Image (spheres, rainbow, N blue to C red):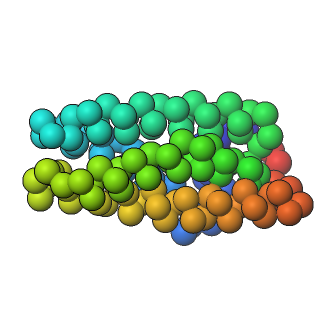
Amino acid sequence: MSFSDAVAQLGTPIRLWVLWLSIMMIAAPVLLAIWRETRRIAVITGCATVLIIAGMQVLYSAVGMVRLLGIVHVVIWGPLFVWLALRLRRGGIRPAPRSVLLLFLATIGVSLVFDIADVLRWIAGERAPMVPAA
């Protein structure tokens, strides 16, 4: 079963959340590339997106649809979240790109809460697949 097939078997709220994450992972770097002051941020978030996609595919192939998959987000988005928050705090970003950046930051922040919880649950022994095996 592919990663996409496994996601399709998750509950509707989780599927909708994965859809939102996917949209944000693509839209944010594209939109941020429009403005000069956020082009570097666009490249870094775009690279993070590529790493997330590759990391999720590799880990899914190794362990299946288990809570440990959240570790990919924690490792990549954790530092990115801190860096983006510090960059926003420094200022110098016009309102439109700032809004895109805030929305992306809020999205990965919410994801990190769930991902950290999932990884901790996996460490605590909750290792069952989140979807039935094909």
Task: Locate residue 22, reporting x and y percent.
Answer: 44, 48
Task: Locate residue 50, reporting x and y percent.
Answer: 47, 31
Look at 80% across and 40% down and name the residue there: 63
Residue 43 lies in what quarter of the image? top left
Quarter of the image where the C terminus is located: top right
Q: Is residue 125 visible?
A: yes
Task: Locate residue 21, reporting x and y percent.
Answer: 45, 53
Residue lying at the far front in this picture: please name it: 90
Q: Is residue 106 left or right of residue 62?
A: left
Between residue 107 and residue 128, name the one nearer to us.
107
Look at 89% across and 60% down and name the residue there: 125
Q: Is residue 130 visible?
A: no
Between residue 19 and residue 125, name the one nearer to us.
125
Quarter of the image where the N terminus is located: top right
Residue lying at the far bottom in this picture: please name it: 13
The answer to whether 100 is drawn above or below residue 33 in the figure is: below
Look at 61% across and 34% down and name the residue there: 55
Q: Is residue 110 left or right of residue 95?
A: right
The answer to whether 113 is drawn above or below residue 38 in the figure is: below
Q: Is residue 80 left or right of residue 10?
A: left
Residue lying at the far right in this picture: please name it: 125
The answer to whether 89 is drawn above or below residue 61 in the figure is: below
Look at 10% across and 53% down and name the residue there: 94
Q: Is residue 122 left or right of residue 77?
A: right
